[in-house]
Amino acid sequence: MRGQSAARIAFLYASHGGGQCFAMSDSLDPAVQPPSLSVLYRDNSLIAIDKPPGIPVHATLDPRRDHLQAQVHRWLKAEDPQARAPVLLHRLDVDTTGVVLFALDPKMNQALAEDFAQRSVDKVYLAVAGSSRTHAVKHWTLRSYLKEVRGAEPPVQAVRAGGKTAQTDVMILDENQDFALLLARPCTGRRHQIRVQLADDDLPLLGDRDYGWELARSAPRCMLHAWQLRFIHPQTQELLTIIAPPPADLRASVAQCKLHEAWGEWNWPVVP
């Protein structure tokens, strides 16, 4: 990529559908990457961060609470005191880990914001869920209506009418009688979409205290990870796939549930 600085970018390159694939490398100079900020990808226009659990991606009503956007801005200002605040291009829940993309160039912000709004950015999540059965069909599409209910617990509900359409492609990577390791690819962008739709399909996520029922006690957080983000770079027109390696707590849940780490073997089928 043009404008990259080798001292600040860590990536593993491989062919991936005619584009480029980036993941975290162990070779990044610790002097330019604080331990609290894992940079997955960076060029003059964009920066992708591997979000840890427990931190919001943007400012909340509590001005004292730190957030990822502020952390990235501080990191950029340490390099250049005149650095603009990065523009957050999409959101993750507080406990969800994985790829978060920011725009550094206002021109790229506009182009990518349109791509996210039009759902032309492909997002793939890893999840560990409870399950009461094994599935004869390993991939399918969830379609439902979701409605946000102010002041309700949980805040988003699947409804028969009056909600917004939601669609998520699901693929089982491994499962047993009690648990499933799966991929989820949201085709729409509703709040809590993956969590609500999976719970409604009898696949509640481990650690999800809003939608996970008794499974909320089986993990320290909601076991959902934004694993891959794939899009056309608006400046170079190259296809990029940015990957956040599964975090240690998710891998521990996979092992405890006696599931196989199958994410290195997946091949997304055509979902009807």
Image (cartoon, rainbow, N blue to C red):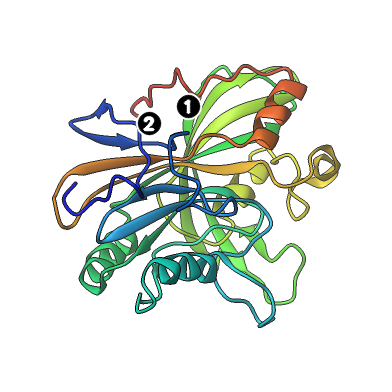
Please, what secondary structure does the residue beneath circle 2 have? Answer: loop
Q: Quadrant of residue 27?
A: top left
Q: In the rendered structure, are the residues bearing label 1 and label 2 in contact, judged by CB atoms less than 8 Å apart?
A: yes
Residue located at (45% from left, 53% from top): 32
Residue nearer the viewer, 4 or 266: 4
Depicted 74 relative to depicted 144: above or below: below
- The tag on residue 139 is 1
Asked if residue 119 lies left or right of residue 97, the reply is left
Residue 131: x, y in percent?
Answer: 72, 29
Q: Amino acid at mark 1?
A: His
Q: Quadrant of residue 205?
A: top right
Residue nearer the viewer, 84 or 97: 84
Residue located at (47% from left, 31% from top): 140
Image quadrant holding the C terminus, namely top left
Residue located at (59% from left, 54% from top): 36
Residue 67: x, y in percent?
Answer: 59, 68
Depicted 86 relative to depicted 124: above or below: below
Residue nearer the viewer, 7 or 236: 7
Q: Residues within 10 Å of mark 2 (few under 14, many from 20)?
A: few
Q: In the current view of this chain or complex, which residue is farthest to the front?
A: 31
Q: Amino acid at mark 2?
A: Val
